[in-house]
Image (cartoon, rainbow, N blue to C red):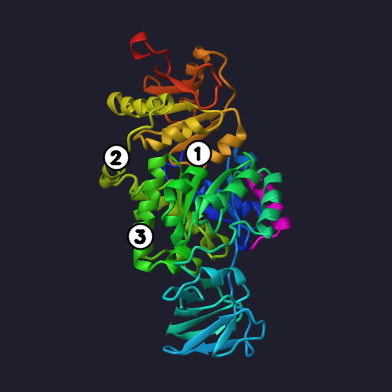
Amino acid sequence: MELRGRNTKVIATVGPSCFDSDKLDQLHRAGADVFRINMSHTSHELLADFHEKIRSVEKRIGRPLGILVDLQGPKIRVGSFADGKANLESGSSYRFDLDETPGDETRAPLPHPEIFSSLEPGMPILLDDGRISLSVTEVGADYALAHVDIGGTLTNRKGVNLPEAVLPVAALTNKDRADLEFALELDIDWVALSFVQTAEDLAETRKLIAGRAALMAKIERPPALKAIDQILDQCDGLMVARGDLGVELPIQKVPGWQKEITRAARRAGKPVVVATQMLESMIDSPVPTRAEVSDVATAIFEGTDAVMLSAESAAGSYPREAVAMMHEIARTIETDPNYRSIIDAQRTEPEPTTADAMMAAARQIADTVQTAAIVCYTNSGSTGIRAARERPSVPIVALTPVIKTGRRLALIWGLHCVLTDDAKDLDDMVDRACRIAFQEGIAKRGQKIIVTAGVPLGTPGATNLLRVAYVGGKSPPSDS
């Protein structure tokens, strides 16, 4: 993977627009660092096919590529209608119940008995991605009456959103369990869990993963916003899933919550992804709108780890152009005079651990003596993630002998991952770091780099050594 010239990573969703290896290779060369596979639209056979093709691209480029599998999660939908559709008049009363008889202009089947106990008078019910809005007026054990605030035409099997209700619905469905196990057998890198409401929703998924992949919580329901810190404790990263979040929240509140979620993840030192409709117009157009460019820029100014393309790369007419545009926006914003001051203003104090203190010191030394890079030896990935949390102004090179670690770190802000053998001793550690920094085009001869590692070498999460070294020569004692 050649140097991207940016710290923010780009995630591209795969789909009909990039079925073959050559097109996936084009997306990588255009800027994709991680590939997302959406299980809402992907069979196990297709998942295995995409996995094989992505790994073939990875083998050709000789660098780790990340694969993120996005689980579908539960879907709450109305049933069918006698005429295939029904018109809900504004100001009228409407009934939802468990009766499977096809619906009409007065009622609709809602085959989800578990949700009625969660509804209360006054709560909103949103249908068809929020196009139709109702307010609950009465609730029973098997029905709910509602006032139609904003009417419209409702067709079969449209989605239902209940933004103020904490629903007694498990985040992991039977389909998700089967998809998860199949994906883990393929050795994918990240799993994104939908419909997270509380920290407890992550427990079963984490148990099933059993360390075989990193777990990302998708924040798409208002109850999750109240439990962000607890959710962060139970996952490895967050995704701001603005699709459902923009339906369940007043849409004007989404930008503020996006900032809050991003900052919470940065405080916790865990990666955060901003997703949904980032360059939506590029599904059909070779260039985005100015508003979309500003939207992507806002996420990058906030220090998000990655920005994600969905239909733009999966089903659009211009997948390569969309990835290239995301790449260029990130490169340009990160050279903006305002970027560094905004990133630095949000820096938080390191955790009271040796490893965090060492990475904070590495960032400060890099700024003070103007080193060319920070080079981290990392087996588990924790050292690389700690380095990224500091958002240093110089490149971070993550050296690891574990390809699975390199793949997971492909999503993390600023990390340039290189596979290499474990260092034999301290001298080899410094020499290897200098040589790789030079070979990767990150440092020139005579420049300084910072090398961090855990001693004894290879000890996971035990970063306790920091060394300033000269590329092309060993460090003098005063720099150790």
Secondary structure at badge 3 equals helix
Q: Which quadrant: the C terminus?
A: top left
Q: Do tag 2 and tag 1 residues touch (Cβ < 8 Å)? A: no
- Picture quarter containing residue 476? top left
The residue depicted at 62 percent of the width and 62 percent of the height is 40
Q: What is the tally of numbered marks visible in this picture? A: 3
Identity of the residue furthest to the right in this view: 45
* Dot 2 or dot 1, earlier in sequence: 1
Circle 1 residue:
2
Residue at 38% x, 66% y: name it: 289
Q: Amino acid at mark 3?
A: Pro
Residue assigned mark 2: 344
- Rendered residue at 43%/88% (across/down): 90
Q: Is residue 18 magenta?
A: no
Residue stretch rendered in magenta on the structure: 41-57
Which residue position is annotated with label 3? 255
| Residue 280 sits above or below residue 197 on the image | below
Secondary structure, mark 1, is: loop
Residue mark closest to the camera, 2 vs 1: 2
Residue 451 percent coordinates (x, y) = 43, 22
Q: CA distance from mark 2 to mark 3?
A: 21 Å
